[in-house]
Structures are given as C-alpha cells and as structure tokens.
Amino acid sequence: MTIIIPFVPSTVRPFSFSPTLDGIVCNVIVTWNVSSQRYFINVYDNTGRWVVTTGLVSSPPARTVDSVVYDPNQLGLNVFLVDPPDWPVPLSPGGLATKPGTIMDYTLENFSPSTFNGEFRGMHITETHFIVPMAINPGIPIITGVASRILSMVSGYFNSTLIYRNSSFEVSP
C-alpha cells in the first residue's frame, strides 16, 4: 500500500517525516540548500545513522499508452504513447534530450490482462515509443494503461520506493 505525504516546502525550516522503508522506520529530513538553490532529502535509519543524501527529484506524471505491439523476433513489447508528449523528454547528463537506444526504467500499470503490468528496463526509441523485453507474447490488451518513469530517491539503498510527484512524497514498502 502506497502512503502519500504532502510536502510543505520551506527554505527556512526543514520538513521531516518518518516513512517505513524495507520494514525499518526511517527519518527523512528535507532541507533547502542555499548554494544549489534546491531541496535535498536526508535519510537516516531508526538508530539515527545517516543512509543517504540526494537531491529532490520529481517523477513525471504517467502517460497514457496509445497501443502496444508484441514483436516475436525481438521478444519485446513496443509501447506507443499518446501524442503530444506530456512527459518532459528525459535529459542525459550533458543536458541533451535522450537519444534513441538509451536504456531507461519504465513502469506499465492499469493494463488488462495484468501480464502487461510491471517494471521494465527498456530502450527509448522516440518521445512516444519505447521497447521493453517480454519473452512470451502477452496477447492483445483488453484495456491499455499508463507508462510511468518512477524515480525512487532511495533506489540502491532500499527495496521500498520513495518518490516525489504532484507535490507529495509516495512511499511504497
């Protein structure tokens, strides 16, 4: 179950909350960094030990999937998004728009049948097209769902996710 924590930003007073990450109650303190002019999250475990500090990154909103086509030769699912893109094009470290062939993490949700749903590492083709690996043909979807680029700020430290979008933190154990 996802827990939503609305973020009340302040450049003067730190914002804090205590999410449960991987079954451990942690303390998250969100601070304003005057030098970089942005917010940072600081995660501490239940003993007060520092775990990670990282910049606050907002996950873009989910995009509606227009269609999906299974390619048996590539063993992949071609996902086509509704145009015009309401997702910002992900930026590479140099600040340039992501080029075709870039590997990115995608989450497919709200499809029926549920065999389409899940987290995938796929290949970015265009702003409205990407391919995710799928060994078995899932068939034709009855209902097409949405594609998300969920950016967990505690990835690599916890299996739980801590994401920020729509002015709120979302914690999923």
Image: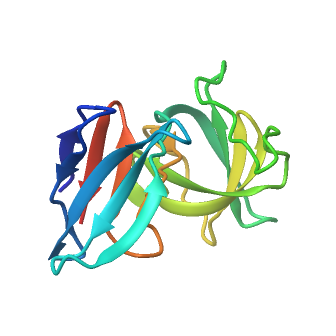
Picture layout, residue 162 above or below residue 141 = below
**Nearer the observer, 130 or 74:** 130
The answer to whether residue 123 of the structure is visible from this angle is yes
Residue drawn at the location 72% of the way across and 40% of the way down:
129
Q: Position of residue 95 (x, y in %)?
A: 78, 40
Q: Position of residue 104 (x, y in %)?
A: 66, 56
Determine if residue 113 is in view: no
Q: Residue at x 28, y 34 (%)?
A: 12
At 35% from the left and 30% from the top, the residue drawn is 166
Specify the quadrant that holds the N terminus.
bottom left
Is 157 in front, or is 89? 157
Residue 157, relative to residue 93: is it above or below? below
Lateral position of residue 119 relative to residue 171, left or right: right
What is the tally of numbered marks visible in this picture? 0
Left or right of 150? Residue 12 is: left
The single residue placed furthest to the top in the displayed view is 84
- Estimate the x, y position of residue 91 in percent, counting from the top left: 72, 42
Which quarter of the image is occupied by the C terminus? Answer: bottom left
Q: Horizontal and vertical percent for residue 63?
A: 52, 32
